[in-house]
Every structure is written in structure tokens, then in C-alpha cells.
Amino acid sequence: MENKLCKWGFKNGDDIKEKSLFSIRSVLETIMENLNEEDGRVLIHLGRGDPSSIPCFRTSPVTEDAIFGAVRSAKFNGYAPAVGLYSTRRAVAEYLSHDLPHQLSPDDIFLTPGANQGIEVVTAVLARPGANILLPKPGYPFYEARAACSNLEVRHFDLLPEKGWEVDLESIQALVDDNTIAIVIINPGNPCGNVFTSEHLQEIAETAKKLGIPVIADEVYSHLCFGSKPFVPMGVFGSITPILTLGSISKRWIIPGWRLGWIAMVDPSGLLKKSGIAECLQSYLEYSANPATIVQGAVPHILEKTTKEFFSNINNVLKEAVDVFYAKVQEIPCFTCPYKPDGAMSVMIKLNLSFLEGINDDMDFCTKLAHEESVIILPGMIVGLKNWLRLTFAMEPAILEEGLERIKAFCLRHTSS
């Protein structure tokens, strides 16, 4: 089967570099070009982290009422300040402070059109000639893309599957030099589905302090935890080392299309303000896109009024899906799942090619699976682990089970004799 990645000048997965050349969307589009139009079965998409169209993941009525109320009020039809509406920043500060040992102020919050733009802003503001940034492997490829745009060298540290995808702290010390600007920590984990313990987060903070670098804490999936480990924000350890927390309403409220995120400076010692980072963040946002004012207007109501029952229901659906997933994946001989997810919406699976015939690598597996079974999953190479697979389990359990049955049939059909 022709691999459509050649339209970018690459002929197979071996040619793909861990740079900003590919996004998750572009790779998924390439895989979907291999779908068999004659297959009458419904497409099962296990490659994206947007379950908003699935009935069991519909957002809260409180969220819907909030946006209706913001529209009807006629108060949010104009431009907002570059850093965001004061009332919205205050609401975000109060929301985040519930889980912290100290209170954030509205001046600690900078609103962005989603967490992706938060990544853009933070990397651009911290960048300087010759600088480097520490990113997890596997990780979220948008960081590599933004690092490349800011001429930042990327240095990867490993997440250890045999230790529940904890950070390999020993390896970090060998990566850091005087030009290291920050370390990125994603918790709950995207793409691994892990949740870091409080003890491990403290170790990360203490390592960052020792090395003299701040932590960029990507907490887009905050509180989407359904295992034995509760969510602990990195900001709890902001007194140890400065924390720049990235968050959004996309995942917890299942409204990624509303495009509202934030950068929070969790820095009780005031080091980020003293260094001019706060001023630089505000200056950057003066020349950047802003979240829609109407969404900003809805956020205080959303953060204050969404019920605990809504959140617990979403987590229960995710837990049920994970239980279905983990049981079924044990039946697929070429798959190894080193860790049952505790949080977020995705999981990493090791692909054992020695069990298969006619499959060259993870990209080849995904394109042929799409063609033969109308199932979409993401090759691990896009998140930094070649010959692994990233599957999204944020799906109705029955559909997830059918998707895994199709994957199992595909693997058995290609099993080496």
C-alpha cells in the first residue's frame, strides 16, 4: 500500500524526524487517506483526544447555560484586554487555588485561546539564542513544533514505562546546562495516561531547583483521574521552584472547540516577576490572538457552578472504558501494555513486530489497519516512541470493545506463521 507521507518528501516512517514536521492532525489525515471506501462498517476513531461528539461525554448543562447567559447579557461583545478579562482571570485564580497551599491572584493568570497557544507563548517568552528546553519522551508533539519556531534546541528525557511512566530523574541532570530554560512535565500524562504521585512531583521540583530551572506544568487533563492516584497540581511545590502551569477548559469540561486556556504563574517567591517573565508574557499577548470574549464571559459561571456529579460521571465513564480496554488488549498477542491508565484519555501500547508478517513499523501498522478494519489509531513515532501505538480510550465502552476486536482480527490475520 502506498504510504501517503511521501507527499511531504518522506517515503516511510523511518524518514520521519522527531521535529515539528508533523502534527497529530496531519498524521491522522494521512492514515485516513488509506481508508477503504468499500468497507461498509462504521469508522472507529481511536486516534484523537476529542470525545465531545460522543453522547456520554456531552458537556454539562451548566456550561451550556453559561454561554447562553454570556450571549444574552450583551456584556461580552467587544474586545477583551490582552491578558484576558479581569473577572475571568480572577475566577481561574480562585479555581486553581482550591488545590494549592497559597492563593493566586488575577495578575498571576494570563488567558490564551487554548493550551496550545499557552505553549506557544511560554516557549517564545523563555527562548533566547542558544537555549534548550527539556521535553518528555513520549510527549505531546506541539512542544517540539513551538520549540522549532523559537529556535530552541530540544533535549528529551525518558518516561519509564516499567515505573508507571515516571520521569527518569537521573537522566535529566546530564541534559541540563547553562542554556536550559525549563523542563516540561505533563500530568495527567498525555499520551501515557499516567498520574504522578505527590512524592514524584516533589522530586521533580527539587531536581529543577537543584538545576536552577523552572517547571512548565502541562495540566490540561487535570482531575481526569480514575485510578488510585489523585491529581496533585505541580503548583503545590511552587515554593521549591517557579511553576508555569498550563491549563484549559477543553478536557475536563469536554469543550475543546471553545478554545480557552491559561498560563498561571505559581511562584510564591516572586522569582518570575523579578526576572521580568510576567512582563514579557503580557507584552507577548499584546500582539497575539485572544480567546473569544463571549467564552471568557462564560468561564466564571462554568468554574463556579459545574457540579461534582458531572465530573465524577465523566471519570466513571473513562474508568469503565479503561477497564474494557485493558481486558481486551491482553488478548492481542502483538500488543504489550506496560501500564493501565490512571488518568487522561490515551494510552501507549508497545507493538511487537516479531509477531507480525508484512508490517514494517508503527506507521505501516496504522495505515494498513485503517484500510482493512476501518479503525484509526496513532503511530507512536509522532509522540516520540517508534514502534509503539497511541490509542485513545475516551469512547463509549461498546464501541471501544468493537474497535479492539477489529484490531485483534487484524493482528491475527497478520500473525507470522
Image (cartoon, rainbow, N blue to C red):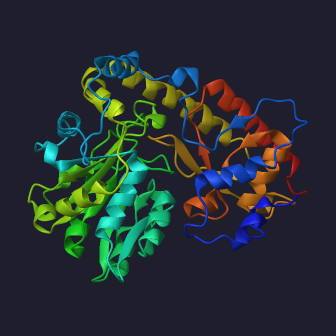
Viewer-nearest residue: 179 or 109:
109
Q: Where 347 sits versus 20, above or below?
A: above
Q: Quadrant of residue 406?
A: top right
Residue at 71% of width from left, 43% of height from top? 376
Q: Residue at 24% of width from left, 70% of height from top?
A: 213
Q: Is residue 154 above or below residue 139?
A: below
- Look at the image and tell me whether residue 304 can be seen: yes
Q: Is 177 left or right of 95, judged from the image as shown?
A: right
Q: Position of residue 400 (x, y in %)?
A: 66, 32
Q: How many marks?
A: 0
Picture quarter with the N terminus: bottom right
- Residue at image position (31%, 83%) is 177
From the viewer's perspective, is 292 left or right of 408?
left
From the image, which quarter does the C terminus lie in?
Answer: bottom right
Confirm whether residue 186 shows in the render: no
Residue 63, placed above or below residue 24: above
Quadrant of the rendered structure where residue 210 is? bottom left
Return the x and y of residue 225 as percentages of the image width and height. Answer: 40, 36
Instruction: Give the farthest residue toward the front.
Output: 78
Picture coordinates of residue 257, whole percent (x, y): 48, 36
Front residue of 394 and 62: 62
Q: Position of residue 163 (x, y in %)?
A: 44, 57
Q: Name the residue: 65% across, 40% down.
A: 46
User: Would you identify the image quadrant in which residue 360 lies?
Assistant: bottom right
Q: Is residue 411 left or right of residue 160?
A: right
